[in-house]
Amino acid sequence: MDSKALFERAQEVIPGGVNSPVRAFNAVGGTPIYVARGAGARMWTVEGQELIDFCGSWGPLILGHARPEVVEAVIRAASNGSSFGINTEAEVEFAELLCELIPSMDMVRLVSSGTEAVMTALRLARGFTSRRKIIKFDGCYHGHADYLLVSAGSGLLTGGMTSSAGVSPSAVAEVLVPPYNDLDAVRAIMAEEGDDVAAIIVEPVAGNMGLVPPAEGFLQGLRDVADECGALLIFDEVINGFRLGATTYGAQCGVTPDLTCLGKIIGGGMPIGAVGGREEVMKSLAPLGPVYQAGTLSGNPVAVAAGHMTLSLLRDENPYSAIEAKGRRISEEVTAAAKAKDVAMHCPHLGGMFTPFFTEGPVTDLASAKCCDTKAHAVFFHNMLDRGFYLPPSQFEVGFVSAAHTDDDITAFIAAAVESL
Ligand SMILES: Cc1ncc(COP(=O)(O)O)c(C=O)c1O
């Protein structure tokens, strides 16, 4: 069965034919692909087309598809029982590893997705501070909890929506939304609302309006403002965590958040999330404290095994400078080719994260991201797909180089990108 036929079948039984909206290719048009299998940097569609994958399951697969050690860890764990809903030694070891690799993490609670990690962090912040309001930046995406579907990026932005039906206005009334990288806007909000702000939540490197790194001093400024007002600072590192080093971006940039949310890479391709941070705050979680949070599959042994193996490999192999060099090549060579061809496009990178933005740039926030020519991006996406390269099917996402990409893969990617412009 080919992708077109599968998509038709899927639409009969799955809303829109997909289990997550951005997979529907609405932003780029055409029929979404159906993948049959993956290995290393490659995957194969049901038609047998070989693709070099620069989406990596939206970020988790920093070691590539089906890395043998991760597969073995999963099989081993699953053969011993895939879920107990009872404590295991493996979850203790995994929590110890996270706390060892992330200096700001005294304690950590495992959950099953990034969305859940963020929901837990915000409930914890509200419970700990006894305050109601939250500052969330325009264009940052933090999962699909009601009160965060406000000017959110990712699939929502792609769908041309800034919010979602079904969200009560009262749920978002307590969420204040300044532009990303705009410290003055945060200060202005805090001057008015500082006494009632429980937390500032931010993607320290934004990845859900395309790649937007923090401006010089932005994160430290947030730390200072939060401290002045008695609010907590939460880094949502669901994308950033373990992306640029075997730790968090917070640890690397020297700004210490009160809480950090993790997901994606820490599950090595299995469903997982985590929230961790200062002991005093974490001890507010049930059963120690009054903030309730629970999960049938939390600390799931199979997910923990995949995550533990992935983080151990990242720590021991340290592939980060090689990934950075590849990300830099893509950025420099693709941007130079666009310039030579007089195409309004630039491709910033940070480590292995990159976004081919179809605008002169720079992109520093959601307003500048929205200047992109999304039609030109869609043409580029399909030109790349035809040449055997899979990118995230939206302008407002991040491409990922993994440890499995070779120099030849990068050379081929750049050649295809130059042709595709
Ligand atoms: C920064 C960020 N936070 C939270 C989430 C939600 O994670 P999940 O999709 O695992 O629920 C995402 C998902 O892409 C994300 O990019």
Image: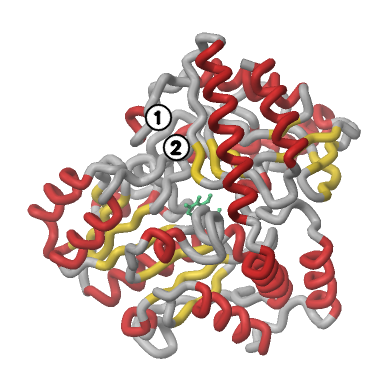
Q: Which residue is mark 1?
A: 369
Q: Secondary structure at mark 2?
A: loop
Q: CA distance from mark 2 to mark 1?
A: 6 Å
Pick the residue in front: 408 or 390.
Answer: 408
**Could you tell which of marks 2 and 1 lies nearer the N-terminus?**
2
Tell me what residue is drawn at x 90 percent, y 34 percent.
48
Q: Quadrant of the C terminus?
A: top right
The percent coordinates of residue 413 (x first, y second) are 70, 30
Q: Which residue is mark 2?
A: 209
Tell me what residue is drawn at x 84 percent, y 47 percent.
37
Q: Is residue 298 left or right of residue 80?
A: left
The percent coordinates of residue 86 (x first, y second) are 65, 87
Type of amino acid under label 1: Ala
Q: Is residue 11 above or below residue 307?
A: above
- Say which quarter of the image contains residue 223: bottom left
Query: Dot 1: few (<14), some (14–19), or many (≥20) neighbours within 10 Å?
Result: many
Q: Secondary structure at mark 1?
A: helix
Type of amino acid under label 2: Met
- Say which quarter of the image contains residue 132: bottom left
Pick the residue in front: 17 or 109.
Answer: 109
The percent coordinates of residue 150 (x first, y second) are 35, 44
Q: Is residue 84 left or right of residue 373?
A: right
Residue lying at the far left in this picture: please name it.
191
Query: Dot 2: few (<14), some (14–19), or many (≥20) neighbours within 10 Å?
Result: many
The percent coordinates of residue 198 (x first, y second) are 24, 65
Q: Is residue 16 above or below residue 333?
A: below
Q: Is residue 309 left or right of residue 369?
A: right
Tell me what residue is drawn at x 80 percent, y 41 percent.
35
Q: Is residue 201 left or right of residue 418?
A: left
Q: Say whether marks 2 and 1 touch (CB < 8 Å).
A: yes
Q: Which mark is residue 26?
A: none
